[in-house]
Image (tube, coloured by chain):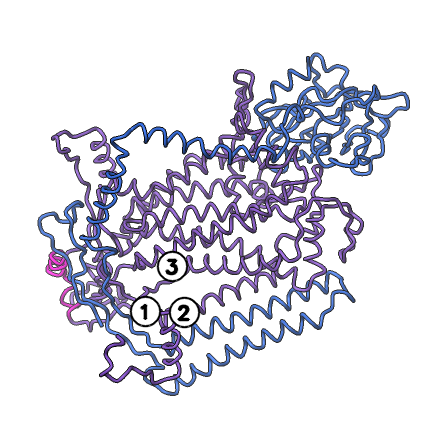
């Protein structure tokens, strides 16, 4: 490498590709990075693709969004429509809505790009959410990845903000009503709510400023923040290296998978085109947000059965579930001559606040309860962390109840039930749904663990019934091969850790609470089967004689 | 390639593991043996996979051609009907989908069938060495120590104060984003202008409504006279002033004290803006005399002066006092006696202002 070693024959690449690589390297010096990453090993699993889907849909959003900005005019000035869509001819509308219609009807490919943009946005938030669920349920948020989990949560919030600002831009009837709801929620904020509303809208609702302001947020500020967060997120992924699912040959000290070049890069790169293709297919076949059907924004009309984009649904659902009056108690009341609108304020802030607070702090909560300060690179199978899995499903259920409530009117009309009953049921589920979900999930996880144990100790059921000489029928069990067997037994099962005195020999109340939570977390665990248990299982079983006669078949998928 | 190291992670002792004293676990058998694919052993299978990949790339080319042809061949300016636009959208979309899916599935198939599929095990290096870790902590501690910030609370506290105040101008410059709210939310267009009472007119065409046109059971969407003629701020005015007008059998109405003169022959007018978060309360159920907000299902009972009987709203819809003028047209005798729409912090203050 060094220039002084003139005695040696200088290294000359043999192939053309090699010479190009060398040319670039000698000028920009990327050989160190290439050595580090060119063959870096990435674990492979279908569930790792959700994050990729999110990343790729963001790229699609940037591309389709840029196209739309060339034609969209975010002005709320009045104009009269004169484009190709005759039902709206001469209708008074804002320039923003007019240009959205022109994009749809008078610019070739404009409608396609609008639909790609909207579908990709829905997919972006959805894949982000599913990716976070995957990370939660497999315990991938544990040390050293807690901060990256937080970055992911910030991305989720930014994605929702980006989605909402974009949803409002066409200035059609639906988006205007969405803004009106936001305005109502903002006005419920104590002390400063009215001012925030006036400053946001540049005066009274709807004013003539909001679309332009949201446009700047939508195409500049929020995407820039999302991009920044994605860079931080991916940087940390590189620092930590990817997690891997448990299995034979995988442990916290290694990474098992495919090298970046060529296999992993080809699969991941090819997957971008697949995601793009699927979004294009949806945009081609399924209409999304047909703004021409709704007409321009007008504060007077509204159509029944309209819904926000799905990711805002849980907040809208919470707004619907909250009763304004219970018996004679009004949730809106007057305090020192001022109005406190709890019937709006509570549902708008509290559920989302709880969800995101728990989401952001959970890695530290679990770390405190379990006293687990080790690095984890091998994921948990969800069943092997029953309490965490149950907490996750409880939270998810809570979210889904609110989300379902956003469609309470559609549930009522589709299933021919009373709207009021749907609301009463959902109000009940709001409180008991998560509890039921927690209990059921925990039991299911424990049952699955017991099943794993059973299979590990007694082998799998082959479905073959054998009649013994004395007339008894038994089913033949076949043992698993070593690799499949290890997958069922190779996990940790921590037991509750008792309260420990601190350096002064005192067991603090906080430590007692931690011990109680640790007990709750781990007490009814199912320990993995041990070699001794396997030994014992083989010793007592009457089927052992038959089993030994079986050829060892591996469990096929 | 297989890493046959022990599968159990390093026990730190902080978490108790199964079978405390007998730490006995199954040994990690290491990576499963690599299984050859058909394309690895049979050259004909490899050739077949190669052809399949090429066909997929070929499909992508066809997709691109479909896109270009449908972009240039379909001219929206000669035929801009909805059907044409839909067809073009479908063809552009299918073209893109084939173009992208062809490349994507082709590459993935290539990677899965023909590129090496040996799983590799790589050592996971620690993010940093123990030495670096301690050095980093020391460096930060030394830096903080050398600033002396802990020993000089005066500097620390004044700095905190300065930093806390410094962003205030950044907040203040947003002061001109909008006007002060003042009492703008307390008034609507319905207030009589120059002593002349405003007529109730139909939404959206603005024709006045005669009391005799309003039959029992009917409902009208109403805007104030002159709204359509406003040069600016029309939507702002409309967002507060829209009204629902209905006629019931006068016997069905429960009228509270002070509102006896607000209705005419069973004709009542209520603000259409929901007191919850401001959606238009657009659904009138004729049989039950209920008004329903389609956004969040707040339900108001028309016979009980729009009292909330279900849903998230907490306040009745404000009533507009109406009467009939000399020509038999419905007019508003005054503005609403309370602010319309969603509640806000100063609302009660404004209500007192209106009634004083």
Q: Which comes sooner in the sequence, label 3 or label 1?
A: 3
SS for tag 1?
strand
Mark closest to the chain's N terminus, 1 or 2: 1
Residue ID for mark 2: A267
Gap between marks 3 and 1, in whole Å? Answer: 16 Å
Q: Nearer the viewer, residue A503 or B166?
A: B166
Classify residue A192 by image quadrant: top right
Label for residue A47? Answer: 3
Quarter of the image with the C terminus of chain A in it: bottom left
**Subunit bearing disc 1:** A
Q: Secondary structure at mark 2?
A: helix
* Residue behind mark 1: A258
Q: CA distance from mark 2 to mark 3?
A: 14 Å
**Does the stretch in magenta take in A544?**
yes
The spot of residue B313 in percent (x, y) is 58, 28
Please determine whether, in this image, residue A496 is positioned above or below residue B70: above
- Residue at image x 91%, y 24%? B327
Question: Which residue is at 52% across, 40% downward?
Answer: A405
> In terms of depth relative to the viewer, which is nearer, A503 or A463?
A503
Establish whether labels 2 and 3 are both on one chain. Answer: yes
Residue A469: which quarter of the image? bottom left
Q: Chain B colour?
A: blue
Chain seen in purple: A
Residue A284 occupies quadrant:
bottom right
Q: Which disc number belongs to residue B154?
A: none
Q: Is residue A168 magenta?
A: no
Label 1 in the same subunit as label 2: yes
Residue B340 is situated, as x and y percent measured from the top left of the image, at 66, 26
- The residue marked by circle 2 belongs to what chain? A
Which range of residues does the magenta coloring cover? A531-548
């Amino acid at each position: 490498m060094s220039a002084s070693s003139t005695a040696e024959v200088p290294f000359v690449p043999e192939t053309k590709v090699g010479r190009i690589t060398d040319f670039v390297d000698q000028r920009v010096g990327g050989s160190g990075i290439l050595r580090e990453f060119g063959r870096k090993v990435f674990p492979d699993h279908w569930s790792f693709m959700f994050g990729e889907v999110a990343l790729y849909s963001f790229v699609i959003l940037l591309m389709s969004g840029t196209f739309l900005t060339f034609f969209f005019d975010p002005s709320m000035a009045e104009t009269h429509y004169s484009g190709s869509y005759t039902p709206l001819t001469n209708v008074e509308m804002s320039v923003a809505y007019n240009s959205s219609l022109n994009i749809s009807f008078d610019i070739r490919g404009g409608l396609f790009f609008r639909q790609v943009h909207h579908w990709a946005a829905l997919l972006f938030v959805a894949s982000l959410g599913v990716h976070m669920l995957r990370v939660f349920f497999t315990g991938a948020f544990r040390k050293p990845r807690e901060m990256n989990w937080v970055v992911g949560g910030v991305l989720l919030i930014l994605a929702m903000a980006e989605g909402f600002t974009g949803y409002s831009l066409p200035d059609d009837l639906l988006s205007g009503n969405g803004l009106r709801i936001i305005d109502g929620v903002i006005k419920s904020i104590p002390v400063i709510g009215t001012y925030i509303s006036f400053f946001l809208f540049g005066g009274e609702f709807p004013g003539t400023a909001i679309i332009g302001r949201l446009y700047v947020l939508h195409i500049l500020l929020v995407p820039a923040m999302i991009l920044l967060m994605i860079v931080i997120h991916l940087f940390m992924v590189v620092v930590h290296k990817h997690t891997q699912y448990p299995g034979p040959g995988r442990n916290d000290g290694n990474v098992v998978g495919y090298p970046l070049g060529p296999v992993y890069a080809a699969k991941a790169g090819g997957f971008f085109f697949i995601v793009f293709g699927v979004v294009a297919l949806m945009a081609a076949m399924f209409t999304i947000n047909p703004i021409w059907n709704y007409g321009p924004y007008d504060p007077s009309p509204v159509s029944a059965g309209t819904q926000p984009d799905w990711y805002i649904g849980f907040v809208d659902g919470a707004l619907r579930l909250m009763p304004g009056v219970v018996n004679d108690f009004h949730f809106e009341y007057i305090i020192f001559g001022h109005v406190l609108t709890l019937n709006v304020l509570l549902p708008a802030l509290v559920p989302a606040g709880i969800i995101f607070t728990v989401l952001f702090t959970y890695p530290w909560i679990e770390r405190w309860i379990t006293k687990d300060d080790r690095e984890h690179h091998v994921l948990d199978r969800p069943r092997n962390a029953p309490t965490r899995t149950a907490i996750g499903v409880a939270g998810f259920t809570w979210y889904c109840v609110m989300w379902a409530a956003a469609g309470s009117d559609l549930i009522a009309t589709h299933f021919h039930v009373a709207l009021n009953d749907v609301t009463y049921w959902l109000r009940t589920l709001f409180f008991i749904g998560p509890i039921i979900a927690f209990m059921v999930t925990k039991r299911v996880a424990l049952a699955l663990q017991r099943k794993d144990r059973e299979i590990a100790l007694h082998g799998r059921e082959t479905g073959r019934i054998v009649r013994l000489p004395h007339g008894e029928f038994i089913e033949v069990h076949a043992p698993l091969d070593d690799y499949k067997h290890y997958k069922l037994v190779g996990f940790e099962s921590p037991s509750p850790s008792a309260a420990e005195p601190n350096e002064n020999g005192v067991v603090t109340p906080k430590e007692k609470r931690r011990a109680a939570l640790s007990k709750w977390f781990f007490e009814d665990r199912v320990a993995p089967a041990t070699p001794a248990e396997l030994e014992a299982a083989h010793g007592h079983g009457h089927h052992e004689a038959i089993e030994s006669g079986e050829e060892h078949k591996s469990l096929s998928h | 390639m297989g890493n046959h190291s022990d599968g159990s992670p390093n026990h730190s002792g902080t978490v108790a593991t199964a079978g405390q004293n007998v730490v006995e676990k199954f040994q990690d058998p290491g990576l499963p043996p690599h299984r050859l694919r058909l394309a690895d052993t049979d050259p004909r299978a490899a050739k077949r996979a190669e052809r399949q990949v090429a066909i997929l790339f070929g499909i992508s080319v066809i997709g691109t051609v479909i896109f270009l042809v449908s972009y240039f061949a379909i001219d929206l300016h000669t035929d801009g009907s909805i059907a044409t636009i839909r067809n073009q959208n479908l063809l552009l979309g299918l073209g893109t989908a084939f173009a992208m899916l062809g490349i994507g599935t082709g590459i993935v198939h290539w990677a899965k069938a023909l590129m090496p599929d040996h799983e590799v095990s790589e050592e996971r290096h620690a993010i940093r060495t123990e030495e670096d870790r301690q050095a980093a902590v020391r460096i930060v501690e030394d830096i903080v120590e050398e600033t002396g910030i802990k020993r000089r609370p005066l500097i620390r506290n004044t700095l905190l104060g300065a930093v806390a105040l410094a962003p205030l101008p950044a907040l203040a410059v947003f002061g001109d984003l909008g006007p002060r709210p003042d009492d703008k939310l307390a008034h609507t267009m319905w207030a009589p202008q120059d002593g002349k009472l405003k007529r109730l007119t139909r939404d959206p065409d603005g024709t006045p409504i005669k009391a005799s046109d309003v039959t029992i059971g009917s409902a009208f969407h109403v805007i104030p006279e002159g709204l359509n003629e406003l040069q600016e701020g029309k939507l702002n005015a409309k967002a507060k002033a829209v009204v629902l007008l209905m006629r019931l059998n006068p016997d069905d109405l429960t009228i509270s004290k002070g509102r006896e003169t607000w209705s005419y022959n069973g004709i009542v007018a209520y603000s259409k803006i929901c007191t919850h978060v401001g959606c238009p309360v657009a659904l009138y159920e004729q049989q039950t005399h209920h008004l329903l907000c389609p956004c969040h299902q707040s339900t108001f009972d028309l016979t009980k002066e729009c009292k909330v009987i279900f849903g998230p709203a907490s306040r009745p819809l404000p009533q507009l006092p109406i009467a009939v003028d000399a020509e038999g047209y419905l007019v508003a005798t005054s503005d609403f006696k309370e602010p319309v729409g969603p509640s806000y912090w100063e609302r009660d203050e404004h209500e007192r202002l209106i009634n004083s």
